[in-house]
Structure formats: structure tokens, C-alpha cells
Image (cartoon, rainbow, N blue to C red):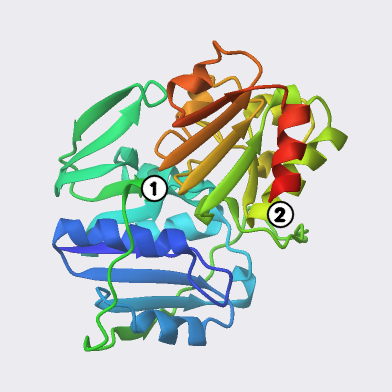
Amino acid sequence: MKTLIIAEHNQHALKAETLVTLGAAQQLGQPIDLFIAGHDIAQLGQDASSISGIDRVLTWDNEALTLPFSETLAPVIASLRSQYSHILLATSSFGKDLAPRIAALCNVNAVSDVIEIISPNQYKRPIYAGNAIATVKNNATCQVLTIRTSAFTSPNHNPTASPAQIQALSIELPMPSVNFVKQTLSESNRPELSGADIIVSGGRAIGSESNFSIIYDLADKLGAAVGASRAAVDAGYIANDLQVGQTGKVVAPSVYIAIGISGAIQHLAGMKDSKVIVAINNDPDAPIFSVADYGLVADLFEAVPAMTADL
């Protein structure tokens, strides 16, 4: 049998999460197809065909897929299930929305947030906010998995590999239950949170939306992405798409700087795999210090501007 990866992209290039999902898929030891849905994606399909490890690129090009919805994609992907033993997606907002829909239509259970592939039907995934690891055995004929991308790496490129076959799918677009109206994107020169090498995150102790400027200033000096705890997001200090944690984004940067974050287990579940963790908090008993490699007990409103000024 074969493995199918559902690609995430911006109409011009594959997202890093898809390449890491490919690295995970290779551990299954099966031929791999890549499914790309979108509009004007001929060049994207060509570029994807040169990626090592992909046997076939399936493209579904339709003007209505400029911003693909899970409601539209799920029935089409589920209709391909007889060809595949595994369907893989990244554990992203896109993957977490689409995977359960595919699984429901295939009448199987999805296995989410896989961090290790033991065998083609046995996996490890975190439970209890990352405080325990469950080993899951799945005997479904078609298995739907989401991959925690911080636990895997992208495959090495093989310049001598033959390009993958490209197959354009002719699929009638299902009657949509959701219609695209418009997309409003926030512009930023900072790195994207999920793929950043350095992340500076602020918590509720920042105190207000305007006070978050000290986080932005430090991040800009470091060339870092900005993140936040759920408490800061719920307080309205920052947009929810920058939330790090169990119900936000799971990240594993080279350096994670937690400022004014106490360290609730839900937040730790989203960042504790970071290579180096730096914590700044005025409470020496804050749980964040239990996972920090470097800790500074100080008033963040004094320490952070001083750090920024010295950079």
C-alpha cells in the first residue's frame, strides 16, 4: 500500500510543516503520494515533484480552491482511501480541522499529534498535556494521522533522484457548504511562529496590549517570532493565532524566551521541546523555572528593556 500526504501551501510554495510530515511518512517505508489542492498550482506541482521521497504528486486545481475549506477537501480525500493505508497531515490548525473530517468519512479513528512512528500501525503521542506518552496501536485499513512537526525533521534532498510523476485530478467540485468571502492577513516582518528559530513569548504579567511593545522590541532585536500564553491571549493583549500551548501552536525553536509566563502545564506542553528555554519571572517558584535552562528572577519591566538596550 501507499501513504498520502495532504499538502499545506500558500499557492506558491509548500509550507515547512508539509516537508516535515514527509520526513515522518518516510518512516512508514511505503511509496508516498502528495495531494495538493488549490488554484493556479501548476508550478507548485512541478516544484513539489523535485522533492526527494515523493513518488507521485496529485494536483486538484480549481478556482474555488484558492482558499480550500475542509468541508470541500474531506469528501474528495476520503474518496481516495482505497488506494492508501495511511493519510498524513501536519498537526496544524489546517490539519486539526481536516483530519477528523476525513477519518469520520472513512469510518475510522484519527490518531492525532504523533511524535514517534514505531511501526506502520503503532505510534506514540502525548496525553495529559504532555505529561505522559501513550503508545497507540491502530489496525484500521486506512489510518489517518496528524504529525507533531516538532518531533520530526525534513528529509535530506537527493539531487540525483528522479522527479515524481505529476497527475492532475479531474474532480467535480462538491456543492460547498461554506463559501469564501475574504481573507484579511496581518503583515509582519517577523518570522512565522511555528517555524521560527527564536521565539519571545509574553504572559499575563505583561499587563496590557500596549505593554507588549517590550516583547516586540526584544523580538525585533533578536530577529525572533512573537508568541504568548493563553492567559495573555484571553486578556486581549495579543492575537490568538500567536498563542503557544496545548490549545495553540506547538513549537520547538532553538531558543524560547518566556517573559512573565508562570508555566501552566498547558503552555509547557506547547514549548517544552525547545532546545534552550529562558525564563524571566519575578516569582522564584513559578513552574516555568522547572523546565528552563536559564532563569532570571527579576521585574520584567526592568530586565527586558535592559536586555534589549544591550543587544
Q: Which residue is mark 1?
A: 150
Q: Nearer the viewer, residue 223 or 147?
A: 223
Relative to 79, 247 lies left or right: right
**In-front residue for pair 226/27:** 226
Q: Which residue is mark 2?
A: 220
Q: Quadrant of residue 82?
A: bottom left
Q: Identify the residue at horizontal 62%, vertical 58% (top origin).
A: 191
Q: Secondary structure at mark 1?
A: helix
Given residues 49 and 177, the one toward you in this image is: 49
Give how far across and how far down residue 131 sits, in percent: 35, 21
Q: Describe residue 130's horizontal placement relative to residue 249 as left or right.
A: left
Q: Percent position (x, y) of residue 197?
A: 51, 54
Residue 84 appears in the picture as rendered: no
Q: Are marks 2 and 1 in contact (CB under 8 Å)?
A: no
Q: At 22% across and 65% down in the image, what residue appears?
A: 83
Q: Where is residue 158 shown, x and y percent of the image? A: 24, 81
- On screen, residue 201 above or below 41: above
- As measured in the structure, the alpha-carbon distance from the residue carrying label 2 to the one carrying label 1 is 23 Å
Q: Which amino acid is tagged 2? A: Asp
Please identify the residue farthest to the right as the structure is shown.
Answer: 210
User: Could you tell me the amino acid type at mark 1?
Assistant: Ser
Q: Residues within 10 Å of mark 2 (few under 14, many from 20)?
A: some
| Point 49% across, 31% down: residue | 294
Q: Is residue 186 left or right of residue 260?
A: right
Could you say which is closer to the camera, residue 299 or residue 1? 299
Name the quadrant of the N terminus. Answer: bottom left
- From where the camera sits, is residue 208 visible? yes
Q: Is residue 244 above or below residue 75?
A: above
